[in-house]
Amino acid sequence: MSGNENENKPDMKMVSIPLSSDDEITNGGNLRGSQTLKTDKVPDEILDENEVEEKNRLINEVLELQNTLDDLSQRVDAVKDENLKLKSENQVLGQYIENLMSASSVFQPTSTGGKKRQSSGKTTPKRGDKR
């Protein structure tokens, strides 16, 4: 456990952001109170600038996604309208085809006379039958 404590202590003292006063820090040894105040202000300004840039980037991304969503919503509405139109046309064409088929003798059920021919005494040889 003592190894973990020693590992954590140096992390607290290290400053990872390079500053214009880095020469003073490396030449002067450890950080002192006045130098700590200087280093605290500069990273805050850098963080604020980074946060503002990130916030602006996220806002722009959200606006772009909203526009994309709006475009997709309009496209879905257009496709729904087209679908309803095609269904209606399909229904009309289906009814038209059904009317044509009922009016045509080709699609009428075969007459009962055809069945009598098959059931009459005459039998026609089937393929493969030798008579």
Image (cartoon, grey):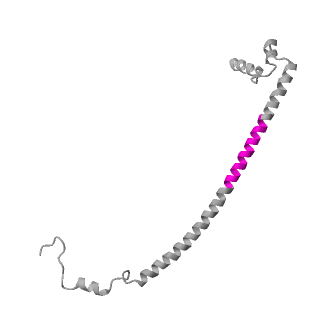
Residue at (26% x, 86% y) in the render: 116
Residue furthest right in the image? 34
Q: What is the magenta segment's predominant secondary structure?
A: helix
Q: Give the magenta part as a residue range.
A: 50-69
Residue at (70% x, 49% y) in the render: 64
Residue at (82% x, 24% y) in the render: 39
Task: Determine which quarter of the picture holds residue 107.
Answer: bottom left
Residue at (55% x, 69% y) in the render: 86
State the quadrant of the C terminus: bottom left
State the quadrant of the N terminus: top right
98 vs 116, left or right, is: right
The image position of residue 112, as x and y in percent, is: 31, 86
Residue furthest left in the image? 131
Task: Determine which quarter of the picture holds residue 22.
Answer: top right
Could you say which is closer to the camera, residue 131 or residue 50? 50
In the rendered image, the vertical position of residue 33 relative to residue 74, given as above or below:
above
93 vs 123, left or right, is: right
Q: Is residue 58 magenta?
A: yes
